[in-house]
């Protein structure tokens, strides 16, 4: 697609809350009205659900130079969506209270989108990062500052795709592999390594969300 888009993927409801999902470069094969919506409903989310769709790659990161060059293009595209289009797209959501959830490279859109937020009339509640392909030593405090709720970072040290990211970034770990370093009081790091192991599949990460609910960090 030439430009990112946003559209509702749930049935209309009377809820004043909306959740925006942002797929990553390894989750585009999933039907958002299937895997994502089912996972969120299983967690008890019954508000509106929207998808912010963007043009990403389905090539899995590996040690080969060609794959790393492909990743650079995907990363740059995600960053541009966050910086240039995020505010405009979120302002199209009619609900005032909005939560965000993203997988893999989609986490970059949340990071830059909230940092560059220029819209009005919206209140961001929670932001959930699943297997985030974004460095953990970035300025996440600015992102958390935009939220009324929590920034929940679900990380997994055994994630194979993020371990390749780690190698390609010369040992700089993404937030999906290790905890975010700068701890704003609203940043919550949840270690899913023992529960998930060697997976980057969005299905598995969505299945971990009930842990965040049971611990009281997310109240869908």
Image: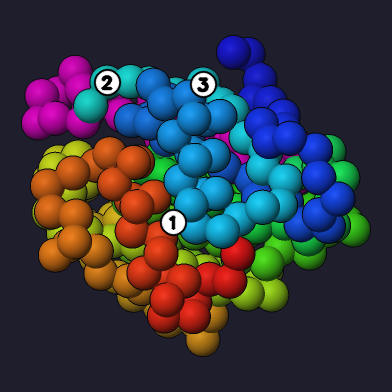
Foreground of the two, 70 or 120 = 120
Kind of element beneath mark 1? strand
Residue 51 point in image, percent of width and height: 62, 35
The residue shown at (13%, 54%) is 197
Above/below status of 67 relative to 24: above
Kind of element beneath mark 2? loop
Q: Quadrant of residue 89?
A: top right
Please give the residue where the numbered disc 2 appears in the rendered image: 59
Above/below status of 189 relative to 184: above
Q: Give the side of residue 47 with respect to residue 24, left or right.
A: right
The residue shown at (72%, 46%) is 48
Foreground tag (3 vs 1): 1
Please give the residue where the numbered disc 1 appears in the rendered image: 129
Please give the residue where the numbered disc 3 appears in the rendered image: 55
Residue 64 point in image, percent of width and height: 10, 24
Is residue 190 highlighted in magenta? no
Foreground tag (2 vs 1): 1
């Amino acid at each position: 697609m030439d430009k990112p888009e946003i559209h509702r993927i749930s049935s209309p409801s009377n809820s004043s809350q909306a959740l925006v999902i942002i797929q990553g470069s390894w989750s585009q094969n999933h039907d958002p009205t299937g895997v994502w919506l089912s996972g969120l409903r299983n967690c008890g989310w019954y508000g509106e659900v929207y998808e912010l769709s963007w043009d990403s790659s389905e090539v899995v990161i590996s040690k080969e130079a060609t794959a790393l060059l492909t990743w650079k293009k995907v990363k740059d595209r995600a960053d541009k969506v966050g910086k240039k289009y995020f505010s405009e797209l979120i302002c199209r959501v009619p609900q005032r209270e909005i939560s965000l959830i993203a997988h893999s490279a989609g986490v970059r859109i949340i990071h830059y989108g909230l940092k560059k937020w220029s819209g009005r009339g919206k209140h961001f509640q929670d932001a959930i990062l699943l297997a985030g392909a974004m460095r953990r030593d970035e300025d996440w405090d600015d992102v958390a500052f935009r939220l009324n709720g929590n920034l929940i970072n679900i990380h997994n040290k055994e994630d194979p795709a993020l371990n390749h990211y780690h190698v390609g970034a010369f040992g700089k770990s993404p937030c999906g592999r290790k905890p975010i370093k700068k701890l704003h009081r609203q940043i919550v790091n949840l270690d899913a390594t023992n529960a998930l192991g060697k997976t980057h599949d969005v299905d598995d990460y969505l299945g971990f969300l009930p842990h965040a609910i049971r611990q009281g960090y997310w109240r869908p």
